Amino acid sequence: MKHDVIDKLRSLRRSVANTLLSGAQNVRAHALMWVLILLLTSFLLSYNLSLKAPKDFPVGEIVVVEEGTTLSSISKGLKSASVIRSRFLFESFVVLFAGDGGAIAGEYFLKKPMSSFGVARRIAGGQYGLAPVSITIPEGSTVRDIAELFAVKFPEFEEEEFLSITRRKEGYLFPDTYLFLPNVHADQVVREMEENFRERIGVIEKEILDFGKPLEDIVTMASLLEKEARTMDSRRLISGILWKRIEIGMPLQVDAVFPYILGKNTYQLTREDLNVDSPYNTYRYKGLPAGPIANPGMDSIRAALAPEESPYLFYLSDRSGNMYYSADFEGHKKNKRLYLN
């Protein structure tokens, strides 16, 4: 009897213990299940939000990703600027798209609202969202001409900054057709135009060395030829005349310097203008002007290097651009009567 009761008590104890243990396991299982449900719900909500742009997304603005910035700093900046909703998802997507490459530095144009997913894809792939704009710089353009052309094509271009940077670069910005992003900065334009000049000059480096004059003199002469003549033949003839004038100590007396000094062309000049005190005034001072008066093209540079010998010492151009040459001043005066008056 006693043993039966003890056995029953032991059996009941085991049953209660098993029940309690089972209950505890169920409680833990249920708790874990709810935690997972909450985490999954939170993730799905965050993911859903990541597929939508923030309400105050900065449409039409440019976001800058600086070189060397950490992904964490980038996401913080984008979050602060209302470009993304979730820093965690943005960073995850960047790593997913770019791996170790990470975000690519640059300026990103935000044309329309996009999700964190879309922003991450663009920044991971260097998709700046800006279509290059073509601009042609005509041969013989001055730095001021170039600044005005860029200001028209690129509304946010800093014209005064460009003029400040190029103060001593007249003649060395190669005229050509370029492609620049709409948000291009003045210093980027100057670097590319100077690099183009150096590349073009590199091609004729031997000719320059053989000619025996400093590059500065050649570029200055080329800038005069760019303004004084239209064809390669006439440029080479005038090149020969001008180098000859320098050699014999005769003033160059080139009218093309006056638009650069005074903004006046040949037909607007007065006697007083011819005496203006400027290191560019080739009537008042012998030799080449103080520097280039424009940015010459390759034909003018080559003409400066390949002057054509002739008996002429004078030349003039009529209003149609036709050239007339003479060996002496009397012939020059006659050409003036015939073709200018």
Image (spheres, rainbow, N blue to C red):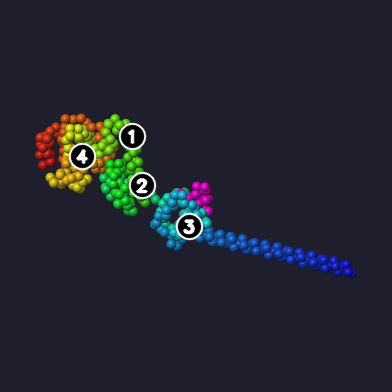
Mark 3 residue type: Lys
Establish if 340 lies above or below 162.
above
- Indicate which disc residue 71 carries: none
Q: Earlier in the sequence, mark 1 or mark 3?
A: 3
**Can you tell which quarter of the image residue 318 is in?**
top left
Residue at 22% across, 38% down? 288
* x then y, percent, for residue 283: 16, 41
Quadrant (top left, top right, bottom left, bottom right) of the C terminus = top left
Spatial CA distance of label 4 from label 2 is: 31 Å
Mark 1 residue type: Val
Q: Secondary structure at mark 1?
A: helix
- Indicate which disc residue 188 carries: 2
Residue that numbered label 4 is attached to: 228
Q: Secondary structure at mark 3?
A: helix
- Indicate which disc residue 76 carries: 3
Establish if 268 lies above or below 7.
above
Spatial CA distance of label 2 from label 3 is: 28 Å
Residue that numbered label 1 is attached to: 203
* x then y, percent, for residue 165: 31, 48
Q: Earlier in the sequence, mark 4 or mark 2?
A: 2
- Categorize mark 2 by other alpha carbons within 10 Å: few (<14), some (14-19), many (20+): few
Q: Secondary structure at mark 4?
A: helix
Left/right of residue 297 with respect to residue 326 in the rendered view: right
Residue at 37% across, 51% down? 183
**Can you tell which quarter of the image residue 325 is in?**
top left
